[in-house]
Amino acid sequence: MSLYICSLNSGSNGNCYYIGDGEDAILVDAGISCKETEKRMQRLGLSMNKVKAIFVSHEHTDHIAGITVLAKKYQLPVYVTDGTRVSGRMNIDRRSAISFVSYQPIKIGSLIVTPFPKFHDASDPHSFIVASASVTVGIFTDIGIPCEQVVRHFQLCHAAFLESNYDEGMLVNGLYPYYLKKRIMGGKGHLSNSQALQLFLSHRPAFMSHLLLSHLSKNNNSPKLVEELFSQHALTTKIIIASRDEESPVYYISNEAQQNIVVAKSYNKPVQLQLSLF
């Protein structure tokens, strides 16, 4: 079974990622408002009625700002660790908040979501992989270092959202105060362009068809720079820059590269456009 994926927003102003199989879907994080989430999904031809759960990576505002309203309006369960819920002071009905355990798969319809811990400056941060019967998609953002868990799960992915937060030179020579530069570049901060590229070059599986580079810094990075850096090494992987200002197209991920197609933005039924892939 194939998966549809898109970024509804990606950056320090809000993060929200959609993964579904056409019948059931989940959101990983909801850091933009309920209204904006609805608008962007409508423009893509996606239905909130197919979203069955929200998974929370950690408690920072750009990942949870829209969850309370979204979960209440659509009666969605929110999968979140106790540490994240408490630290984020998340006002979620106890009946809606479902605690998860690292490495323990969670079944949402025909989707299997597996959380695993990561290094980030939060109380109990996690990344996720989402799998159907034959396709796996990873969400790897807000990562201090590409640790063994990230590497191992990245190697399973047909597509991935991968943080490429900052250019080292731009950050070092930029206007951020020293303490903030140290936090970002530390082992529990964010992944640089060079770290993300090294992960991609060293551990990309041959079957990875799409890489959505995510959580780019507004002040310490450039979408053009990131796209040029990765595209020269892309081979058979399509490189996409996830925007901090708008939704991405919906990408259809299968386990056969020649079947991958992009679903165009549409206010009505998504239109499937056959890509000439590589």
Image: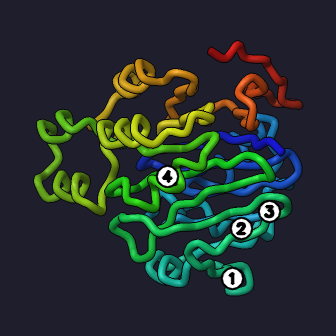
Check if mark 2's residue and mark 1's residue have beta carbons within 8 Å: yes
Q: Nearer the viewer, mark 2 or mark 3?
A: 3
Residue linked to disc 4: 140
Q: Amino acid at mark 4?
A: Phe
Residue linked to disc 1: 93
Q: CA distance from mark 2 to mark 4?
A: 23 Å
Q: CA distance from mark 1 to mark 4?
A: 27 Å
Judge left or right: residue 182 versus residue 58. Answer: left
Residue 28 visible in the snapshot: yes
Counting residues from the N terminus, which is met first, the one under dot 2 or under dot 4? 2
Q: Amino acid at mark 1?
A: Asp
Q: Nearer the viewer, mark 1 or mark 3?
A: 3
Q: Position of residue 186 (x, y in %)?
A: 22, 58
Report the quarter where the C terminus lies: top right
Q: Residues within 10 Å of mark 4 (few under 14, many from 20)?
A: many
Check if mark 1's residue and mark 3's residue have beta carbons within 8 Å: no
Which numbered marker is on residue 71? Answer: 2
Q: CA distance from mark 2 to mark 1?
A: 9 Å
Q: State the residue at coordinates (54%, 36%).
A: 212
Q: CA distance from mark 3 to mark 4?
A: 21 Å
Residue linked to disc 3: 52
Q: Amino acid at mark 2?
A: Ala
Q: Position of residue 269 (x, y in %)?
A: 88, 31
